Image (cartoon, grey):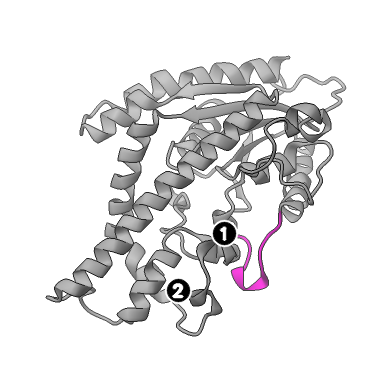
Amino acid sequence: MDAAFPRRHRRKEKVVVIMGATGTGKSRLSVDLATLSFPFSEIINSDKMQLYKGLDITTNKIPIEERNGVPHHLLGEFNPVNGEITPSEFRRCAGKLVEDITSRRKLPIIVGGSNSLIHALLVEKFNPELNVLDEFAPPSQLNDQPELTRLRYECCFLWVDVSFQVLCDYLLKRVDEMLDSGMMEELAEFYDPESDDLHCDSARRSGLRKAIGIAEFDSYFKEYPPQRGSWLGDDPVRQGAYERAVRAIKDNTCQLAKRQIEKIMRLKRAGWDLRRIDATAAFREVLDGGERWSEIWEREVLEPSVKIVKRLLLE
């Protein structure tokens, strides 16, 4: 560890930031780095939905057994009944964690797909009134105002990217796997027939209730209230309603990935040094049912990432 962190004055803390669209393997890469190459690391979650307690399958939190003992922060730590965590609140909480982790001569690894939270945490000057990553914001806004992207840490950005069509195919598969793992039961327990959110579109919901899967199945549960036993029975109308909800989840997940990639590109054009790591071959192997997924992942994702992080630590 002393070799990685030479005893000399540094103006800025060093942090690793793993970015990418939903489903691209960011959590796996963070644990791989912390387990296999940089055992002095601690992980800070920057996924909006994973900040909250509950809906672990629906929000795709990394299971405890897959964390390999690596400390994870801000993962399922906030009670959703207390309201939504704003970017400013995330900046304050995550900023304190970065300070604490680096003070203990550890390496913070920030991981998540919520680029608005990442931006809020990393920039020197954050204006909560200005959403610079909004799709309707002028493209020149970040370029013309460098103070909106100037970083307060010395950052190593790993952008895990997957060809969009391959990613979408994988996301469709992942939704089916999540349903097989109990996502439907989880959403049924979360369903509240008295909630005002039943009358709101997804954009007007807050906090955890923005998670993909809730709005799509709220309408289904309103028509077919959750009960023990089979979800579908022999009712073809109910089967059709269920299939429409699942199809909406899949469509909305792919649209989310598209928006996340657009925001990443916006930050890259503004000057952030995002190092793209192409994980397409590994995900194609998964979709083809091949057995070489881990081998390809290690060669094309993990090894290049380790080299990039080592350069940060030795500078």
Marks 2 and 1: which is nearer the front?
Answer: 2
* Marker disc for residue 118: none
Image point 15% across, 76% down: which residue?
235
Residue 219: x %, y % from top left: 38, 73
Q: Is residue 89 located in the magenta-colored stretch of the structure? A: no
Q: Which mark is residue 76?
A: 1
Quadrant housing residue 133: top right
> Which portion, as a residue range, is magenta?
76-86
- Chain-order first, disc 2 or disc 1: 1
Asked which secondary structure carries label 1, the reply is: loop
Frontmost residue, 95 versus 240: 240
Q: Position of residue 84 (x, y in %)?
A: 66, 64
The residue labelled by disc 2 is: 190
User: Label 2 to label 1, Cα distance in Å?
Assistant: 15 Å
Circle 2 packing at 10 Å, graded few (<14), some (14-19), many (20+), is some
185 sits left or right of 194 in the view: left
Above or below, comparing residue 77 to residue 185 in the picture: above
Q: Are marks 2 and 1 in contact (CB under 8 Å)?
A: no
Q: Is residue 113 above or below residue 288?
A: below
